[in-house]
Amino acid sequence: MAAKFLKIAVVYFVTGVLLGLTMGITQNFSFTSVHAHINLLGWVSLALIGVIYYCYPQAGTTSLAKAHFWLHNLGLPIMQGALFIMLLTGNHSMAGVTIAGSLMLVIGVILFLINIFKNVSDVKDVPFIKNNAM
């Protein structure tokens, strides 16, 4: 799962950068919260999770990791897409969709927490650290 998390993180990175570029060119910064969430919850968080799963492969191969991946990567685009539409149109009828996406993401993050507590015990479990004295 480490590679999947890292690859999707890069997709969010490019998306966030392109949205930021568009806002800068148009001088319309009304989508700043969408831009920030895509960068933080997409690029930064998923890249860190990918690195964690690389360091602790026993955690990255669980059904919890797979469920987290799908909940996070369905919830975030739903949440941010609905928020984007609300900001674009000024119509708040998409608030329920934004909340549904947010809940999916939160449940995924809770599964990540459970997975880490169940499957990560010590820094000595990291494969590339085992061979070096620490």
Image (cartoon, rainbow, N blue to C red):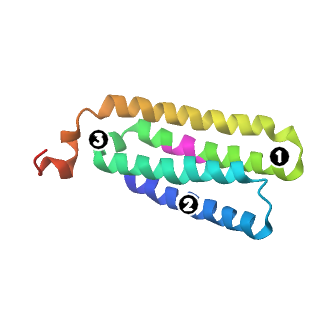
Q: Would you say 38 lies left or right of 82 here?
A: left
Segment tinted magenta in the rendering: 69-73
**Residue 67 picture location, percent across and down:** 49, 39
Q: Label 1 amino acid?
A: Met
Q: Name the residue: 67% across, 39% down.
A: 101
| Element assignment for label 1 | helix
Q: Residues within 10 Å of mark 3 (few under 14, many from 20)?
A: some
Tell me the residue at 43%/36% (across/down).
64
CB of mark 2 within 8 Å of CB of mark 3? no
Residue 88, percent across and down? 84, 53
Give the label on residue 58, or none: 3
Q: Quadrant of residue 96?
A: top right
Does residue 11 show up magenta in the picture?
Answer: no
Residue under label 2 = 13
State left or right for residue 111 relative to residue 53. Answer: right
Q: Which amino acid does label 2 sit on?
A: Phe
Amino acid type at mark 3: Gln
Q: Mark 1 points at which residue?
A: 86
Q: Residue 57: image x %, image y %?
A: 29, 46
Task: Give the camera-side residue of 47 and 108.
Answer: 47
Mark 1 touches mark 2? (CB < 8 Å) = no
Mark 1 residue crowding within 10 angstroms, few (<14) / some (14–19) / many (20+)? some
